[in-house]
Image: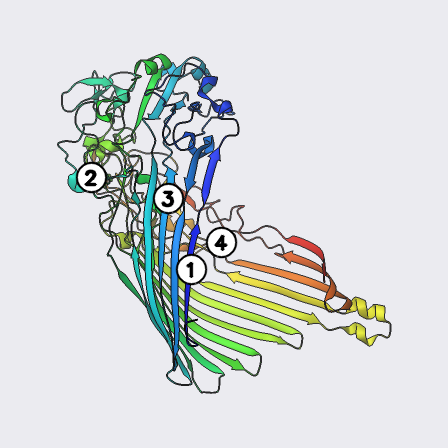
Amino acid sequence: TVTPTMVNETTLGYTWDQYTFKTTDNFATEARSLIPGLPTLFPVPTTDEQGPTNGYADPTILPQFQFGGAPSNAVGYTRSGASAGQEIATNPTWYYIDNVSKVWGHHSFKGGIYVEFNTKYQPADRNYAGSFNFASSTSNPDLNTQNGFANALLGRVNGYSQWNGTTTFNDVYQNYEEYIQDNWKPTRRLTLDIGVRFYHQSPQEDNNFTFEKFFPEKYSAAAESRLYTPVCLNKYPCTASSGLAARDPGTGNTVSSSYIGTLVPNSGDPASGMAVLGLNGVDEAPYHQSALVAAPRLGFAYDLFGDGRTALRGGWGIFYNRLDGNQYYGLSGQAPLAYNVSVTDLSLAQLAAQHTDTPPAISSLSGVSPISPQTYPNVVPWDTVQNASADVQHTFGTNLVADVGYSFNHVYHEHVAAGCCDINYVPIGAGWPFNQANLDPTTGGSTSNNLNSNLERTIFPGYGAIEDANFSGHSNYNALTASLNERFTHGLAFGASYTYSKAMGRTTYTPGIANQDEWNYGYVSTDRTHNLQVSYTYDIPNVGKYFAWKPVGAILGDWEFSGITSMISGAPFNPGCSLTSGSKGVTGGYTGSPDVGQRCEVIGDPLSGVQNGRYYNANAFAMSALATGPNNSIVGPPALGNLGGGAGVLRYPMVTNFDMTLTKVIPLGSEKRVLKFQAQAYNVFNHSEFSAENTGVQLDPTTNLVSNLNATGLPTNTVTGSNRIMAFSARLEF
């Protein structure tokens, strides 16, 4: 306390957490020596400065094993990283807070700072021990034993992959916030809250220099490695076992067809545009934001009539979110620092023959798939939220309070969920049947096979998918709210609240779509139009007091009945359309791109003609028509469908629930000592609440009519809650 009207509060704190996964037997039950002689592409290190929990175990652990689906009881061994007892992650944090409060006349000022220093130490968990797949394969006679265990015993490998190493990042980042606010009473009836908060947040930078990302401006198509393309050597169409080969488009040399879509060794730089952050003049920060942003806040409360019974309240403010590390920890351990090599269709002996004592450069290896890195834009906007609300509250009598209000929430520059935003997507119409040049030569046009999708990527040729962070998401929420609450009077208390709301937005991103809002804007998954909640508590009158015999009064008195009733709109959903079987002219895909899925074509009102307990009419949907030419060729553009985006245009059923409680209290000579018996019933009327239904519409490829009409629109056995639950308790309070 500085003065009677001024107070300073300071906090200095330190927190530390650790997640440790380790074995209790020093890896004895998963040591690689349990199965001696297992080959590898690269040596498996036995020691590392990171220690056994964050790098290489000593003794080294088993590789992963998978045996496919035959026999049906086939099991695999898939331990790696944390599941193998090889991880320790720590997150120590220092923080300093200082707040100063000052009362001055009708003003109450407050200001302060918040400083936070964080470190995050965690492994990237790359599987350097290797992974075997012994699944049976009909395309390769050597693997066609129809039994994965038999293939393993015979040394026949469907696929093997191995990382050349693993990494552990050591991130540091800081948060700085400053604020000043004033609670001001300009009049007896009006109170204002005015303030502003300033934010500065640093990105997470890796002091171990294990972060890599893709820089589009550094990419060179001429310098990038080539990819093997398919070619028929003796006939067309050819097959995987007769005439099909992989061709180097630069030299014309051919190799086994199993290399189609993989990198041609020594043909260039397979990681053109990739760089290690913090080394060789590259910025250590994955991204940059504006150094300082302001978040103003405004609130008010006004006594409308000066009698203390009717209040008008409102507020508005801006808030900023910080990216959490899980959104870009995938930058650690990417090429060229670490890379994964996969080989297929070979024996254990052939795998052993490819072993190298020192992991070679990725550009010199055979069977390496194109790199599919994660990256980040150089400049990132602040993920921003604006909130606003206003409401009127009035007290009727002494115990009844009514409130009517409006709430608004707007989010922009929202980080779109990971896995959404491939900047090296396959363009719409790039694949067969819209582009005959991208027809797999093994097909002759009779099936749906396209080229390997990496061969259709024309934005950054030589790469696979390139996952780039995206901050174009936005959403808005508008709600009218009303509530009525009766304080406990004459043995009764109740409350009722109702919200009529609409939540819209675009929280996803579809590569290749020109107008993202037109394609993806719609209801968000949390939208619930109506939400009614009613609660009540009632002290049942003690009729026993009218009897002269006390035991009767003790039995009939001190009973309480209470409950909660909820009625909430169902979640939005979209049906999905597909064909029951393939047909020429459409089996190549409606969009010509694996990155864009075709949607239903809405041809009627889904809520019209609904019958037999269904929630929508499947006859309102069809597959888009494709314009065909001679020999089933496609002469028109790709078809995307016109079904709306977002979480959906239809609704699951409303959820209605009743929970009730009956309580009996027995005083034990004093109000401080009571025995309480209680019976509770959740979903007391045992009403089924369905949260899912059959949304898959299957259409006949010849007639384009719904073929599974008997199933569509009916609820499945998925429910939001359980059946009625009864709970009984006896409780002694003293």
Of the numbered discs 3 and 1, the one sitting upstream in the chain is: 1
| Residue behind mark 1 | 11
**Which of the labelled discs sits on residue 513, or is there none?**
none
Of the numbered discs 1 and 4, the one sitting upstream in the chain is: 1
Q: Amino acid at mark 1?
A: Thr
**How packed is label 4: few (under 14 Cα within 10 Å), some, or many (20 or more)?**
few
Q: Nearer the viewer, mark 4 or mark 3?
A: 3
Tell me the distance, in whole angstroms, between the alpha carbons under discs 2 and 4: 39 Å
Tell me the distance, in whole angstroms, between the alpha carbons under discs 4 and 3: 57 Å
Q: Quadrant of residue 492?
A: bottom right
| SS category of the residue bearing label 4 | loop
Q: Amino acid at mark 3?
A: Lys
Residue that protrudes farthest toward the bottom in the picture: 306
| Residue behind mark 3 | 120
Check if mark 3's residue and mark 2's residue have beta carbons within 8 Å: no
| Residue behind mark 2 | 635
Q: Nearer the viewer, mark 1 or mark 4?
A: 1
Residue 441 placed where, x, y %?
Answer: 23, 25
Q: Is residue 631 visible?
A: no
Residue 559 placed where, x, y %?
Answer: 72, 67
Q: Quadrant of residue 154?
A: top left
Taking 592 as reference, is 620 above or below it?
below
Q: Amino acid at mark 4?
A: Gln
Of the numbered discs 1 and 2, the one sitting upstream in the chain is: 1
Q: Amino acid at mark 2?
A: Val
| SS category of the residue bearing label 1 | strand
Of the numbered discs 4 and 3, the one sitting upstream in the chain is: 3
Tell me the distance, in whole angstroms, between the alpha carbons under discs 3 and 2: 55 Å
**How packed is label 1: few (under 14 Cα within 10 Å), some, or many (20 or more)?**
few
